[in-house]
Amino acid sequence: MTLIDVAKVAGVSPITVSRALNRPDVVSESARKKVLEAVRVTGYVPNMLAGGLASNKSRLIAIFVPTIAHSIFAETVQSLMDHLTAAGYQSMIGLTGYSAEQEERLLGAVLGRRPDGIVLTGTLHTEQSRLRLQAAGIPVVEAWDLGAAPIDMQVGFSHEQVGQAIAKHLYGKGYRRFAIVSVDDSRALKRSRSVATQLQALGIETVPMMLLAAPATVQSGREGLCRLLTDGHRPQVVVCSSDTVAQGILAEAASRGLEIPGQLAVMGFGDLSSAAHLHPALSTVNVDGGRMGELTANALLQRLRDDECKPVRVDTGFTLVDRQTT
Amino acid sequence: MTLIDVAKVAGVSPITVSRALNRPDVVSESARKKVLEAVRVTGYVPNMLAGGLASNKSRLIAIFVPTIAHSIFAETVQSLMDHLTAAGYQSMIGLTGYSAEQEERLLGAVLGRRPDGIVLTGTLHTEQSRLRLQAAGIPVVEAWDLGAAPIDMQVGFSHEQVGQAIAKHLYGKGYRRFAIVSVDDSRALKRSRSVATQLQALGIETVPMMLLAAPATVQSGREGLCRLLTDGHRPQVVVCSSDTVAQGILAEAASRGLEIPGQLAVMGFGDLSSAAHLHPALSTVNVDGGRMGELTANALLQRLRDDECKPVRVDTGFTLVDRQTT
DNA sequence: CTGTTAGCGCCTTCAC
DNA sequence: GTGAAGGCGCTAACAG
């Protein structure tokens, strides 16, 4: 079934069918009716490969995420996809979480589909990849960060500020013996280092930090606490690089009979909607992933409509939620 | 940058470039080298829209999932995508979790990309959608179920058997006062009803069942237990339609000071890798989502290679894990 | 092993 | 408001 078949059935020229489907307002009422009816009768499904080739527009947005399972970005991606779908765009998810080599292959394959735009949630691992992205000449939004040297647009927050907020808040509550359990990922490290730096500025000399291999798992969180205690550290509060790590800490603490937050307070980090029920006394820094997805979609769609509009840079902020009674 | 540019640089004809890239084995060593070098120099990225249009093969697999955030299918999708990527296919995720109307539009849009195959994880909501899928004439795999009237291939397990296994196991442990908290989703209902039916066969007359609106959330799980208790039920064990619901039950039980599993035992259901750390005494029926993804990919890839191979129907089974000490 | 020819299904441009 | 011609970038089929 092609446009031509539909045109024959409708008794108009192929181009009129195309217009009736893509720019209904530019076609007469009667022509549009005939075409729509013919589409219904024939069960015609427009071929977007052909359409994209001819128009040089794919109506496709590529979304890069480190992983999809238990991802801190899940809400963002869901919301982003919803908003893009509503605007008539489709999304293609690329999983970057593995080797840098695989990431480059993936980028090549995705770029081959000629997406109209690209969203990055995690970070691209190689400079080469960043260059190819730039070379593609399409709008790019980096989400979940507000780092230096943006490729194009950014929608996110400052990981340094998160770390500072955590340090100040916990210090203000009177804690003096800290520990950090962090995944070895660039943004997680930004937050963790910022916590340590700020604590030092407040006079806390030593802040033991356990570094775990990415990706974060509950299991690695458990191990983090184990090693901390084995090494002889006795923190009053553990700052985690993510809620997943925090969950591991909580599980390990439970199995050791440690009272939360009395004997050990825990601070997590993650998406607003995912952490709420992990533990009644788990404090967290929350980010609204859904909103970030929406803002990302808006930034992209605006640029897609108006190529010359100024590049967006949105600070979505974050919220420190204290659930500790102490 | 087009194939023709590369051909000029390499000093061969366009078709040789095409072949060097797509079927390297049918091209001479020297030609291949020249082409690869020219590709490197030019930074050429093949246009898959054009390629797909010409060859009538998109190297694209569509994956339909109800939702991506906190999804029971996350591991399956991740694994599936990994395996498809390794085989040179890209995946396009469609989110079906909302209105039936939206689902039909989505299906139309996705079919417009001419995917080479389709994977369904959740169920399609309308008959119309099923028909369009059949009409597309491409391989379809339904995952996470082994229901009657398969569209094409199936990789999954029997939800009825899950229900029966749960009922028999808990009855065998001596429980006599049951309750079910289930989400209102076709497969969840299959499991929950099967539990109730089997319990009745074992002589348990009344099994109160709380039905919650989909999608399952931790919050709805909490409410399920609240309503159960408010209604005067005092179950020894609550069977949940998913781990997410179970998590809600656990949270609510904790806030009421109910001992798990002494005062209230809980049975969940879900993916192997996600439930492990929710609660030390949470029993579950586990399904290996990663393996299901792999088997799904294999079924699809095999069919894609050999169009005439017999349609696959794989029972992946499930595992009942009892973590209760009682 | 390599090249030529033709066309995939649609949209752009320009004319009416 | 509608149509005719041409081409988007690539590959199938056939020829050499």
Image (cartoon, coloured by chain):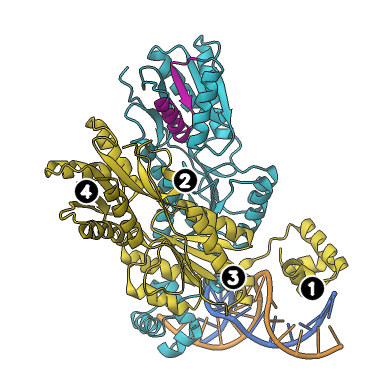
Chain colours: A cyan, B yellow, C blue, D orange
**Residue A252 painted magenta:** yes
Q: Are marks 4 and 3 on the same chain?
A: yes
* Cα distance between the residues tagged 2 and 4: 26 Å
The chain identifier of the residue carrying mark 3 reads: B
Q: Given contact means CB atoms under 8 Å apart, are the residues at marks 2 and 4 in contact?
A: no
Front residue of B266/C7: it is B266
The chain identifier of the residue carrying mark 1 reads: B
* Cα distance between the residues tagged 3 and 1: 23 Å
Q: Are marks 2 and 4 on the same chain?
A: yes
- The location of residue A256, given as percent across then percent down, is 42, 23
Mark before the other along the chain sequence, 2 or 3: 2
Dot 3 amino acid type: Gln
> Can see residue A191?
no
Identify the residue under disc 3.
B302
Disc ID at residue B184: none
Q: Residue at x 74, y 66 (%)?
A: B21
Nearer mark to the viewer, of 3 and 1: 3
Give the farthest residue toward the top: A203
Q: Quick one: label 4, few (<14), some, or many (20+) residues within 10 Å?
A: many
Mark before the other along the chain sequence, 2 or 4: 4
Mark before the other along the chain sequence, 1 or 2: 1
Dot 4 amino acid type: Ala
Mark before the other along the chain sequence, 1 or 4: 1
Mark before the other along the chain sequence, 4 or 3: 4
Stretch of the chain drawn in magenta:
A234-255
Dot 1 amino acid type: Val
* Cα distance between the residues tagged 1 and 4: 65 Å
In the displayed structure, would residue A313 be above or below residue A304? above
Disc ID at residue B26: 1
- The location of residue B193, given as percent across then percent down, is 25, 59
Mark before the other along the chain sequence, 3 or 1: 1
